[in-house]
Amino acid sequence: MSLHFKSLRSSSSGNCLLVWTDRTRVLIDCGLGSMKRTREVLTKNLGDQLDVDAVVVSHMHSDHIGYYSLRVLDSLGVKVRVHERCLTQLKGKHFNGRRFCSLKLKPFADSSFKVGDLSFQAFEVPHNPWYPTYGFVIKYGSSKMVIATDFNDWDSLLEHFVDSDFIFVESNHDTELLARHFNPNSRFHMPNPETGKLLCTARKHSRRPPQVVMLGHLSSMRNRLDIALKEVERSFESAGAELDFPLLVAPRSEASEVVKVNHLSKAGVSYKESGMIAAS
């Protein structure tokens, strides 16, 4: 019995993550642009039946959920879970006048909720103040997974990362590349050095290393895979701490390989050199 993870897309152009067990499949976000692209990505990774138990949405930015992806999910009869604070925003921003009468929309709150045999605990993260945004602690048996992107400060979030078996976390931009290609919206996202500090601090407070950590939501103009990895390594070196877990990066425009999180503190990981890069 294992918990599995796969990043289907992870960037400012679109985000969709897949978490599953033997009995349950859940998407975290589904911001894939057009209906055609949404169907193509989901079919390639889920099969022709597009069998998924629910889509759990982190926030209402269009690269995480949108009108066209909602149309596809509506046609498939997939349950869509959004925080109760986001319901009005979802309808106002993404319904585009369509009633979506048959959309299986089910809100969640700050208390934990279940999808199949997966237990979710949402926690609010600091992002754009006009868009309530949530990360998720996902538990399955003794395994703990944390997924958090689109935030700019981690001081109040550390407890969620401690003692995690798998971490998917934003490492959005390099500060030097941001200076060259300035974007005011980058202030709502985590720069590489802060992601490194978060991971280093979480490791110091944890009883064991995570089985795998994957960096995600990298900016296409303001970050590079090698820079993000080096910044995390530098954070551990500066703190005199050992980076004692596999460190990977999610591709921006293609799916990652599967990460398998086992109950017995072991992980099976495969990755392609062109897509995910392991820290040396």
Image (cartoon, rainbow, N blue to C red):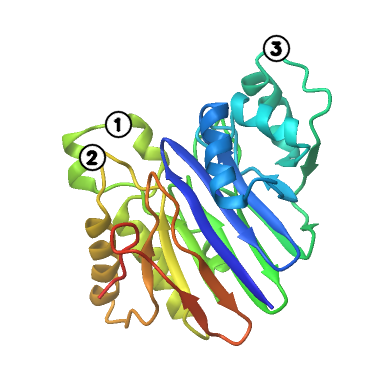
Q: Where is residue 68 in the image (x, y as percent from the top left)?
A: 60, 25
Q: Position of residue 131 (x, y in %)?
A: 57, 33
In the rendered image of this protein, does residue 9 appear above or below residue 257? Answer: above
In the rendered structure, which amino acid carries the disc numbered 2? Leu
Q: Name the residue under label 2.
A: 178
Quick one: 106 or 272, which is closer to the camera? 272
Q: Which of marks 2 and 3 is in front?
A: 3
Instruction: Give the quarter of the figure containing the C terminus.
Output: bottom left
Q: Where is residue 66 in the image (x, y as percent from the top left)?
A: 59, 28
In the rendered structure, which amino acid carries the disc numbered 3? Gly
Q: Name the residue under label 1.
A: 183
Marks 1 and 3 sit apart, C-alpha to C-alpha, by 31 Å
Marks 1 and 2 sit apart, C-alpha to C-alpha, by 7 Å
Q: Is residue 164 visible?
A: no
Q: Name the residue under label 3.
A: 97
In the rendered image of this protein, does residue 87 appear above or below residue 265? Answer: above
* Disc 1 element: loop
In the rendered structure, which amino acid carries the disc numbered 1? Asn
Marked residue nearer the N-terminal end (1 or 3): 3
Marked residue nearer the N-terminal end (2 or 3): 3
In the rendered image of this protein, does residue 128 appear above or below residue 50? Answer: above
238 sits left or right of 252 in the view: left
Quick one: 53 or 42, which is closer to the camera? 42
Tally the numbered discs: 3
Q: Which of marks 1 and 3 is in front?
A: 3
Marks 2 and 3 sit apart, C-alpha to C-alpha, by 37 Å
Quick one: 151 or 117, which is closer to the camera? 117
